[in-house]
């Protein structure tokens, strides 16, 4: 992993006389920063953009873009969680017959308040 990051320009460890990499304290902090950024959902390309630029505006732009992408993923995950909760709390034996679930599907399909046909309901089962 460290060699891959070095090849991408994320790390530049010092070299010993025999050519071996020598990681110092600064490299340790850089690795920690890369790992933290990966955990935050940034890809290696975004991390490279953050580390390669001295321009605070460029770094801020990377973070703004990442925040927007994360907010979108959270919104989709929240909608999925709500749908699953709805299905688990539904009083209908077959979720496909639930009017609320049908409305959610119709909205997703761009059909407004339309209810699915029998064929579409059968496909959900």
Image (spheres, helix red, strand yellow):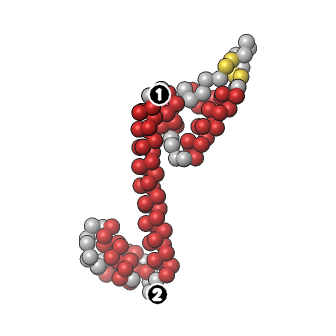
Residue 90 location in percent, x, y? 46, 83
Query: Split into 4 quadrants, where in the image is the N terminus?
Result: top right
Q: Is residue 48 left or right of residue 58?
A: right
The relative height of residue 75 versus residue 22 in the rendered view (above or below) is below
Residue 68 location in percent, x, y? 41, 49
Residue 83 location in percent, x, y? 44, 72
User: Quick one: SS at disc 2?
Assistant: loop
What is the quadrant of residue 110 in the picture? bottom left
Q: Residue at x 56, y 29 (%)?
A: 10
Q: Residue at x 49, y 81 (%)?
A: 89
Earlier along the polypeptide chain: callout 1 or callout 2? 1
| Foreground residue among 64 and 95 | 64
What residue is disc 2 on?
91
- In the displayed image of the protein, which residue is found farthest to the top? 17
Disc 1, disc 2: CB below 8 Å? no
Q: Residue at x 46, y 34 (%)?
A: 59
Crowding at mark 1 (Cα within 10 Å: few <14, some 14-19, many 20+): few
What is the quadrant of residue 30 in the picture? top right
The relative height of residue 86 versus residue 28 in the rendered view (above or below) is below
What residue is disc 1 on?
53
Q: Residue at x 48, y 37 (%)?
A: 46
Q: Is residue 82 left or right of residue 11?
A: left
């Amino acid at each position: 992993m460290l060699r891959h990051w070095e090849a991408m320009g994320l790390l530049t460890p010092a070299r010993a006389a025999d050519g071996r990499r020598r990681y110092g304290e600064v490299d340790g902090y850089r690795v920690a920063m890369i790992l933290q950024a990966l955990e935050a959902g940034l890809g290696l390309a975004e991390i490279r953009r953050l580390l390669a630029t001295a321009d605070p505006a460029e770094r801020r732009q990377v973070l703004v873009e990442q925040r927007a992408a994360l907010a979108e993923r959270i919104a989709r995950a929240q909608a999925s969680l709500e749908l699953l909760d709805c299905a688990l709390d539904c009083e209908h034996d077959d979720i496909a017959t639930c009017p609320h679930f049908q409305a959610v599907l119709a909205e997703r399909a761009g059909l407004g308040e339309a209810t699915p046909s029998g064929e579409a309901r059968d496909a959900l089962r």
